[in-house]
Amino acid sequence: MVATPDIWRNEYRHPGSWDRSFAPLSVSQMFAQSAAKNPDAYLADFMGRKFSYADVRLGMNRVAKGLQTLGIKKGDRVGIFLPNVPHYLAAYYGAMKMGATVVNFSPLYSVEELMHQVEDSGTRLLFTLSAKALLPTALEVLDKSSLEKLVVGTVVEALPLAKSLMFRVFKGGESVDMPKRRDVIPFNEVVDNDGVMERVGIDPRKDIALIQYTGGTTGTPKGAMLTHQNITVNARQINAIDPEPEAEDRIMGVLPFFHVFANATVLNRTVERGGEIVMLPRWNAAQALKAIERTKATALPGVPTMYTALLDHPRTPKTDFSSLRVCISGGAPLPVETKHKFEALTGAKLVEGYGLTESAGVVSCNPYDGENREGSIGQPIPSTIVKLVDKEDPNEPAPEGEPGEICIAGPQIMYGYWNRPDADDQILHDGFLRTGDVGTIDGDGYIYIVDRLKDMIAVSGFKVFPSQLEEILYKHKAIKEALVIGVPDDYTGEKPKAYVTLEKGEEATGDALKKWLNPQLGKHERVADVVIRDEMPKTMIGKLDRKALRAEEGV
């Protein structure tokens, strides 16, 4: 089924029309427009220290000049291995201004994960912090990969208070000494210039602004290439569905900027609008509640587990939420009970939306004002077409009245995967992006996800791919077979759980295997349990049967 244009035009519940166009616009042009309109307006609040648009514009210009001085050219890949700190703003917008392609890396990555993506993307230079949780990992990757340089900042540079505050702002934030090496450059040295860079021409529709890694259907990380136009269009699409475009705009930046959800709904959307971001370097319910009251925040995008954590926190009933207008939930299905409880407690509207890395962020959302349909991911944002195709044959429409694979077309859809034309052929079909999610569309154009084709496990909005965990399990000499599935979890939505059989003559306990496995994984990937079985379910041809395992375990 394809929801016809008449649905979007006649039954469209978002403000304005569904059918609209977006002029070409680079990311740096988007920033420049907002900075020129009101340079003294605040763009960021970091732990109480304010940064205006003029401040960040100066920082990004100096980063752009500094990168050129270091030999970075248009099209070179510049990595960002940072939590939500002011350095991210200058590095992100500065690199894009001088024509480099930013590559986002999660601060949760292990050495192996970071090194794989650095090598795959050809990242030449990496921004990070002199923090215990980051710098040792980055240094090891610098020594073992083709990465050429590290640019290292400190949280203290951005804080309004004493250095001791650094120990409280994010877990593992203790400072470590920066080695004296020619390939390790202090952030302050990079920005010690006049900010007058050599001009670079950018084609918004063709030049790649960002490589954002996603697991894909096979679990192998792939870099989605997002053009400047993909990013600025999605920012404009998100702002277009706000019924109060002139309202005060102060958004909570608790989602990590390295993730496409925050990159779209917090960072670029706010810059395009000229709003302010209340930045927190990591998710902490108590700090978020204090920041909402202190700054009178008006919006809080998050994943369902964040709203659950807020509901469970003892400070929540005493918190003044009167400034909050709207909260957007994404990354995982939003439980109806969570929505109702949060809205009743705060008085804010909590709406569910949907997006993918390959769509530069957002595809659809329930209306801020008007009807929210429970269990629905809403209607498409402007200029976005959604259709359903047969789950087995994308050349055929989904059978009438049956769910189909959700496919999307629109100006925010990625250019393609980095160096993976084979993957492009699988996911880009007849002008549409195949999402791997199975859903339905009702008569008013509201979309519902009912299943998913992928084996991914959604942990607090992060995608965990069983094959990657299984690959590590197989490295243990005692393990003969391994399968990982997602099991329900009240807090994270799902958690990985591993099931193994042992080689003949080998002995091990589930607890011992769990203790061996989890330190090798990112925090969101860690398994809840390792269960030792006598045998695994198998298909008729002898393959391990994940579907049968789920059925046996009742998930």
Image (cartoon, grey):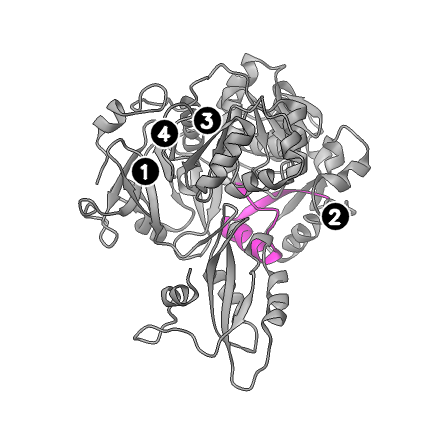
Callout 3 crowding tier (Cα within 10 Å): few <14, some 14–19, many ≥20: many
Q: Are marks 3 and 2 in contact (CB under 8 Å)?
A: no
**Numbered tag placed on residue 144 in the rendering:** none
Disc 1 and disc 4: Cα gap in Å?
Answer: 12 Å
Q: Is residue 99 visible?
A: no
The residue indicated by pointer 4 is 381
Label 3 element class: loop
Disc 4 and disc 2: Cα gap in Å?
Answer: 48 Å
Mark toward the start of the polypeptide (1 vs 4) = 4
**Which one is closest to the eye, mark 1 or mark 2?**
1
The residue indicated by pointer 3 is 26
**Which one is closest to the eye, mark 1 or mark 4?**
1
Name the residue: 63% across, 32% down: 317
Q: Are marks 1 and 4 in contact (CB under 8 Å)?
A: no
**Which one is closest to the eye, mark 4 or mark 2?**
4
Decide which of 428, 473 is in the foreground and name it: 473
Callout 2 crowding tier (Cα within 10 Å): few <14, some 14–19, many ≥20: few
Q: Which residues are magenta?
A: 103-131
Q: Residue furthest bottom?
A: 505
Mark toward the start of the polypeptide (4 vs 2) = 2
Label 2 element class: loop
Mark toward the start of the polypeptide (4 vs 3) = 3
Type of amino acid at the residue the image marks with label 3: Ser
Residue 437 is situated, as x and y percent measured from the top left of the image, at 34, 48
Decide which of 456, 131 is in the foreground and name it: 456
The residue indicated by pointer 2 is 181
The residue indicated by pointer 1 is 447
104 in the magenta segment = yes
